[in-house]
Image: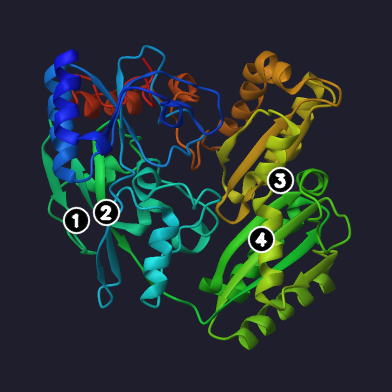
Amino acid sequence: MDGLLAHLRQLLGAAGFREDGDLSPWEKDWRGRWPGSALAVALPASTEEVAAVVRACAAAGVAIVPQGGNTGLVGGGVPDATGRQLVLSLRRMNTIRAVDVANLTLTVDAGCLLTQVQAAAEENGLLYPLSLAAEGNCTIGGNLATNAGGTQVLRYGNARELCLGLEVVTPQGEIWHGLSGLRKDNTGYDLRDLFIGSEGTLGVITAATLKLHPRPGAVMTALAGFSDLNAALRLIDRSRRALDAGLTGFELMSAHALGLVQQWCPPMRSPLPATPWTALIELAAATEAQGQRQLEELLGDALACGDITDAAVATSLSQAAQFWALREAIPRAQALSGLNIKHDIALPVSAIPAFVSETHAALQAALPGCRPVTFGHLGDGNLHYNVQAPEGVEPATFLREQEALVNALVHDRVSALGGSISAEHGIGVLKREELARRKSPVALQMMRAIKQALDPQGLMNPGRLLPD
């Protein structure tokens, strides 16, 4: 082990290697639930240095934990408590390598922040539409390793749909140069898709060629209030028919979720009267006038039919930002109110009203007074169905004592309705054993076969994603 550390110290230099002092920024996860202890932290500055680090660790039999911005929510990007795993941080690899405006592509290092990529696209009059609450801290490599979603999946798709090619260092320290900007390439297995969503268990993503889009002439935002989720389905259907591909976002917020924002993030509050549910609708249009007209007609029809009780269309960029701030403040308000049991689930959009009503009833029967905090990307079927402790119950105690029961109740309903226990956050450590219970044996067998074929030593992010 000393020989490996000495080699890495010489290879990476003082700026690229940490083994002493405070390593907690790399050892603690975003939620603070899985603190670990790293053997050391490698911060390579190039793909070649990444490959050299991986080769050295493979020869020494040392496990590697790839890490981007360390903003994950499932414990997949931090070392375990053994002190024998090397953290491989990509944050120093943050170069915009190339922009091809005619091909609508952008090639970047994996350590580029999502905001940096968005800005590079904007500077060229284009759009990289991936948008997350953590976009100022998360990296493109991490986004791809977890197949991140966000607020515009309804129109543009997950991170997977926004990536055309990858550069990857394999578990043996070889470099796969797959940075293709092609939209059609049927020459065998799609290796890119193996690594996207693999959470660092098959290799280290070091760069990506990303798909860009033309910037819309105007982006319009509205809020709409309604009394039940069946009305929400009718509003989604109406929005799709009226706005077609212009519909870029349809976010759902429960009254309790917005109440937490009002309580913990003053002076933020919805401009609409209190209502059980609120939707945030976003439209991309050719002009502001066209977008304003489309939204007003859509919401006017919905009001006339009784599907919604009230609505507000943002008339300025600052007002649109205020609408989005309500939605984006929900996770922060939850954190300020205390620990809660988090779920990141996907369902057919048509099944969401039944899921919410049935799961809420089951939770109240088992744990009277518990408080679901329901919000998320209703347009693509992704809900963050989180559960708070009843009033007067200490949140940490509730999490510790009731998480297994709550997870079983929630995930049983998800499975019964044909959904997924992880929509955009990944599996990591948090859902590893749950995956073993919910995934089919055939699927697990194929996943293990892929892992064994690419990483026979089992040194790439061991203990994450795949159950033992």
Q: What is the crowding at mark 3: few (fewer than 14 residues within 10 Å), some, or many (at least 20)?
A: some
Closer to the N terminus: mark 3 or mark 2? 2
Compute the Cα span from label 3 to label 2. Answer: 38 Å
| Residue 464 location (% of width, % of height) | 38, 24
Marks 4 and 2: in contact by CB < 8 Å? Answer: no
At a point 50% along the width and 41% down the height, the residue shown is 423
What amino acid is at disc 1?
Leu
Compute the Cα span from label 4 to label 1. Answer: 34 Å
The answer to whether 179 appears left or right of 393 in the picture is left
Compute the Cα span from label 4 to label 3. Answer: 24 Å
Closer to the N terminus: mark 4 or mark 3? 4
Q: What is the crowding at mark 4: few (fewer than 14 residues within 10 Å), some, or many (at least 20)?
A: some
Per the image, label 4 sits on a secondary structure element best described as helix
What amino acid is at disc 3?
Pro
| Residue 415 location (% of width, % of height) | 56, 31
Q: Is residue 238 above or below residue 413?
A: below
Q: Looking at the figure, which quarter contains the C terminus? A: top left
Q: Is residue 66 above or below residue 400?
A: below
Q: Looking at the figure, which quarter contains the N terminus? A: top left
Q: Which residue is mark 2?
A: 208
Q: What is the crowding at mark 2: few (fewer than 14 residues within 10 Å), some, or many (at least 20)?
A: many
What amino acid is at disc 2?
Ala
Q: Which residue is mark 3?
A: 353
Closer to the N terminus: mark 3 or mark 1? 1
Compute the Cα span from label 1 to label 2. Answer: 6 Å
What amino acid is at disc 4?
Trp
Q: Nearer the viewer, mark 3 or mark 1?
A: 1
Q: What is the crowding at mark 1: few (fewer than 14 residues within 10 Å), some, or many (at least 20)?
A: some
Q: Which residue is mark 1?
A: 179
Q: Which residue is mark 4?
A: 324
Closer to the N terminus: mark 1 or mark 2? 1
